[in-house]
Amino acid sequence: METFKGNFTQQEPIPDEAIEAAVAVMQSGRLHRYNVAEGEAGAAALLEQEFAEAMGANFCLAVASGGYALACALRAVGVKPGDRVLTNAFTLAPVPGAIASVGAVPVFVGVTEDLVINLDDLRAKLDHTEVLLLSHMRGHLCDMDRLMALCDGAGVTVIEDCAHTMGATWKGRLSGTDGLVGCFSTQTYKHLNSGEGGLLITDDAEVAARAVMMSGSYMLYERHLAVPEPEVFEEVKYLTPNMSGRMDNLRAAILRPQLRKLPAQCEAWNARYRVVEEGLRGTPGLQVVERPDEEYYVGSSIQFLLLDWSEDKIDAVIKRCSARGVELKWFGGAEPAGFTSRYDSWHYAPSERMPDSDRVLKAIIDMRLPLTFDLDDCALIARIIRAEVGAVFQGN
Ligand SMILES: *Cc1c(COP(=O)(O)O)cnc(C)c1O
């Protein structure tokens, strides 16, 4: 019987070029982003300029984490304590956490079998709210044209959580550029790795200025390279509290060379994704998540559904795969575990039950595809899952 020996949490090493850039920052001693020599552009400012350029956005701000970027975006668009903010029922804990951190109230919108936000449920919940924090959870993009038309029609501002869609597109438009603000994470398991870190993009000058002030720019915002004109700050600087959450030059230095490799990395993830997807397709009892033609995804993880399976059987699949070295995560477990949890785990944000979403959430099996796996590894992983799902499905 075949077993897999790879490690699902092992990312690639930081590229040599990035290590050299990090060492240079450390040798300079100028790690704080505003601690720059006269006329020098620090790594954080350069990263912002390069990320704005890569995303085709007017403005960019680098911050301490993806979760910080989300909370900063919520505040910058004017969310106040007590406001209702729509978000996905299928997302990661930092997303409702960002809403709660500004004193607002998360209102969850259901998930479809395609693992995207349910647009009918969204339409039904658009009243009495001004903001949607849209999470492209695990890289699945909904019909962004329909979503934006619905939200624009209702006057609802969209903030995009692109933690899993950096580099992805909908009809050629980069994820994070449809909404008023796009937020990204550079935490180790995302598409760029600085341990912790976040990036925020927007074309809105006032939102950008508020976000920069909030992130802790003091009155040094002119040292940024991807911010609005100083005039915009004139109005904002007296009104915006400093909620310190900057990125430092060391992390930014690590990220800049990685950003240049992003398109190639996306292709490498997708090659792995397609091998696993093809290997799983047609397995009795297992539903592959079909991707729409309009979407260019980044397959840094893969999901499949065991729809309407009993908990015991799903549990058996996970244990049997684990015994053969394949680590699957289950969003449907009754208790939150590891990184996984779901809307009914967040008791601070009570929600009405959504039976259709519960059925989907219970069925979601999730697996990382780190780039340290090669295509043969991916084929082996798919064979193991296929065999174990098949065995449990047939009751062996
Ligand atoms: C990781 C993640 C975040 C938050 O990013 P951090 O940098 O860890 O704060 C937000 N949303 C989703 C869907 C994530 O996976």
Image (spheres, helix red, strand yellow):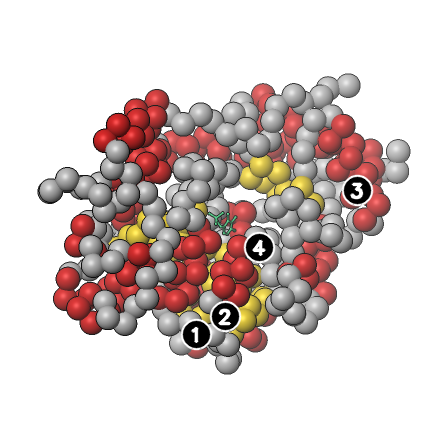
| Residue 60: mark | none
Picture residue at 68% right of the left edge, 46% below the top: 337
* Mark 3 or mark 4: whose residue is earlier in sequence: 4
Q: In which quarter of the image is residue 40?
A: top left
Q: Is residue 330 left or right of residue 246?
A: right
Q: Quick one: 179 or 18, which is closer to the camera?
A: 18
Identify which amino acid the numbered label 4 is placed on.
Answer: Ala
Residue 183: x %, y % from top left: 40, 54
* Label 2 residue near ligand 1, CB within 8 Å: no
Mark 4 → mark 2, Cα distance in angstroms:
16 Å
Q: Residue furthest right?
A: 396
Labelled pair 2, 3 in contact (Cβ < 8 Å): no
Labelled pair 1, 3 in contact (Cβ < 8 Å): no
* Mark 1 or mark 3: whose residue is earlier in sequence: 1
* Mark 4 or mark 2: whose residue is earlier in sequence: 4
The answer to whether 120 is drawn above or below residue 281 in the figure is below
Picture residue at 50% right of the left edge, 53% below the top: 136
Labelled pair 1, 2 in contact (Cβ < 8 Å): yes
| Residue 315: mark | 3
Labelled pair 3, 4 in contact (Cβ < 8 Å): no
* Mark 1 or mark 2: whose residue is earlier in sequence: 1
Q: Quadrant of residue 18?
A: top left
Picture residue at 24% right of the left edge, 70% below the top: 238
The residue singled out by tag 1 in the image is 80
Quarter of the figure that contains the C terminus: top right
* Mark 1 or mark 4: whose residue is earlier in sequence: 1
